[in-house]
Amino acid sequence: MTEASNFSWNPVVDWQELTGHAFMRDALIAGTIAAVVCGVVGYFVVLRGLSFAADALTHVGFAGASGAALAGVSPIAGLLLLTGAAAGGIGALERYLRGRDVVVGMILVQALGLGVLFLRLSSGYSNQTYALLFGDILALSTHDLVVLGVAGAVAVSAMVAIFRPLLFASLDGEVAESRGVPLRGLAIAFLLVVAVAVAAATQVIGALLAIALIVAPAASAQRLCSRSGLAILLSVALALLITWVGIAIAFWQPYPVSFFITSLAALTYGASRAVFWLRSPRMVASRPRLRRQEAI
Amino acid sequence: MRRAGVRFGARWIWRHVDLEVGEGEFLVVLGPNGAGKTTLLRSLLGLLQPGEGSIEVLGHQPRRSRRQVGYVPQKRTLDGDLNVRARDLVSLGVDGTRWGIPLPTRTRRGQRQMVDDALHAVGALDYADHPVGRLSGGEQQRLLLAQALVTKPRLLLLDEPLASLDLQGQAAISALVGGIARNGGIAVVLVAHDVNPLVGVLDRVAYVAGGGITAGSADQVITSESLSRLYRYPVEVLRDSRGRVVVVGLEDRDAHHD
């Protein structure tokens, strides 16, 4: 990506090099916001089994951003607006949609199709298409950063506010309902926050890959930690690590940031499964032993 | 409940129901599938409004006394991958309705004590820190009971807590709930398919069938005639040499219907 710098193995020099350019500082800030929001939101996306719905939202976001470009407004505004609207709809219908992969899949492809149409109508295929689909974290404007920062802060505050009832509703909906937890209201509120996470992740790694940043760190953290609060913190930490390392590698390599971030995300998830498997050998080992005893 | 009825649209699930449960009383609700047993529990929780008559729980409208009602819905086995501590699931019974994130305060320590007490009461302390998904059906059932008990309710509503348990587990949970009702003075309304594991611990039986609910003592209801009428299927009540009651015939019927 840059010709001037070489990786020096000297952390101080490398850090100065990495943060020496304005576009790199902006990229790191955007990555940080996206990682924090996605880490927090992702935990509940995984817990509620909404990965596919969240993925559909990313595609709706693509349609929103390309539609905004066609209408001449800022893509991030269109992104937030359309994912927000779709999230409200999905939230209201969540009970109905649960387990209906076909319906969610149809929304997903229709949104993608619309996005392609909007792009052709506005400018034809271009760098913008590429940026929307696969991310272009180095091309963010200050305006984008401000919008992202404000939306991220609102999203995280909302998650802090609804944390306990949302956890209750996600684990044990019927009991939560009997205690007066507003299930539908929470479902809608949560999906609106997911919409913000989708918008943030799309800015960093693009609509097609955004789901990686939402699901992988959270799913890994959930495997590694059974305490919800700690698992969310771990999820944020993993998301930050994946994003920062991904951006840093891409700084010294001529390949796209999105590739490194998604690869690191997949690696992290694989590693978490391995750790989970290694940490529970008793379950595996005790079964044959039990059977042998029964045989005697 | 006085002259109460519940309907979905134009169809009455049941109506003209008069039913009362006293302190520490163990009421078992029987009836064929789809007769409205779960509907009865949901109306006691205030999740369904009666279409006629009135329902009072602990002297108030159902919604107003819901903090004093413990509820264990019909069980689905929790996902084996669900990596959430057993203790945290019970803890949500205390503060799951509160907004914000939990902060380390004195009430928080008090809450830990409440959770430990509830876990102790159901004999689940041993696996309090295990992930829920790794527990057996009976262990999960105990946890859900602990979650319902943690706020020290005066009324406990249990929907099919014995389903999907083996015979030993059914006996253990029945005895546990019986003890809770008797020793804690907690009124229990338990919906069941099979009355057998409960015969020794229940006080009264209500049966839901044919658009109505009738309650009676165990001796009145658990007879061959009344159960056969209730299920519209030949059921026999036998007494063994030690005076224990066994109901024969329901197992087959359930197998056909589920």
Image (cartoon, grey):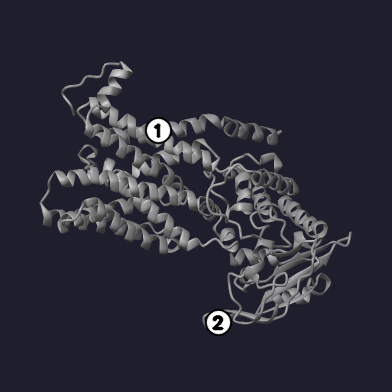
CA neighbours of label 2 inside 10 A, class few (<14), some (14 to 19), many (20+)? few
**In the displayed structure image, the side of residue B248 where residue B97 appears, left or right:** left
**Residue placed most toward the observer, B75 or B113:** B113
Which label sits on residue B11? Answer: 2
Which quarter of the picture shows residue B86? top right
Image depth: mark 2 or mark 1 in front: 1
**Host chain of mark 1:** A
**The N terminus of chain B - image quarter:** bottom right
Q: Secondary structure at mark 2?
A: strand
**The C terminus of chain B - image quarter:** bottom right
Q: Secondary structure at mark 1?
A: helix
Which label sits on residue A189? Answer: none
Residue A105: x percent and y percent?
32, 56
Which residue type does callout 1 highlight?
Thr
Classify A15 as above or below B171.
above
Which label sits on residue A268? Answer: 1
- Residue drawn at x 59%, y 67% as measured from the top left: B257
Q: Do the residues at discs 2 and 1 belong to one chain? A: no
**Host chain of mark 2:** B
Residue A219: x percent and y percent?
44, 41
Which residue type does callout 2 highlight?
Arg
Classify A94 as above or below A135.
below
Residue B134: x percent and y percent?
59, 42
**In the displayed structure image, the side of residue B204 where residue B233 appears, left or right:** left
Classify A182 as above or below A161.
below
Q: Is residue B233 visible?
A: no
Residue A88: x percent and y percent?
37, 61
CA neighbours of label 1 inside 10 A, class few (<14), some (14 to 19), many (20+)? many
Q: What is the CA distance from the residue labelled 2 to the residue labelled 1?
A: 54 Å
**Residue placed most toward the observer, B44 or A1:** A1
